Image (tube, rainbow, N blue to C red):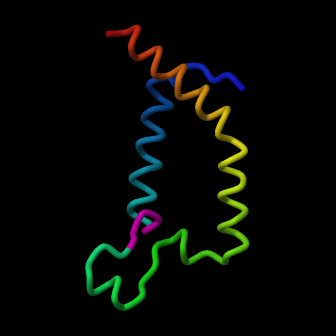
Amino acid sequence: MHRSIPSHNECIHAAAAVSDMSRNGFLSRPTSKKAISKGERGLFHGLPKELRVTAVMAAMEDIPATRQSNNVSIDAQRAMK
């Protein structure tokens, strides 16, 4: 799979998605000693084990395509310098 360099609008939409994720608590995780000692968990570790395993397996299958896409993006960034 080959992806082109994202346009300005695609970057803006991605930035909006990150702020939405943060606002909705998808990025929250226990970071203080108090929260950790209370056994609080982040979103990923709060999922059922089967779903966590499935998510990791899917990510592992996508590694070659993701690496290629990232390398293309990095090469384009280097070319623009």
Query: Left or right: 33 with respect to 16?
Result: left
In this rendering, is residue 80 above or below 13?
above
- Most distant residue in the bottom direction: 38
- In this view, the residue in front, 31 or 6, is 31
Q: Which residue corresponds to the image point at 73% horizontal and 72% vertical from the top-left?
A: 50
- Total residue callouts: 0
Q: From the top left corner, tell me how far across and down residue 37 is, in percent.
A: 34, 89
Does 51 appear above or below 65? below
Residue 65 occupies quadrant = top right
Q: Is residue 2 left or right of residue 75?
A: right
Q: Position of residue 5 (x, y in %)?
A: 53, 20
State the residue at coordinates (53%, 28%).
70
Residue 16: horizontal and vertical position, in percent?
42, 46
Closer to the camera, 20 or 67?
Answer: 67
> Most extreme residue toward the left, as rendered?
33
Residue 36 among those drawn in magenta: no
Task: Tell whether 26 sits left or right of 57.
Answer: left
Tell me the quarter of the picture where residue 80 sits.
Answer: top left
In the rendered image of this protein, does residue 78 appear above or below residue 42?
A: above
Magenta stretch: helix, strand or loop mostly = loop
For the record, the magenta segment spans 25-29
| Residue at point 32%, 84% (across, down) | 35
> Is 62 situated above or below 39?
above
Residue nearest the observer in this picture, 27 or 52: 52
- Residue at the location (67% across, 33% down)? 64
Task: Classify the position of the C terminus by image quarter.
Answer: top left
Q: Is residue 71 left or right of residue 33?
A: right
Verify whether residue 28 appears in magenta.
Answer: yes
Percent coordinates x, y for residue 63 in the rendering: 64, 39
Q: Quadrant of the N terminus?
A: top right
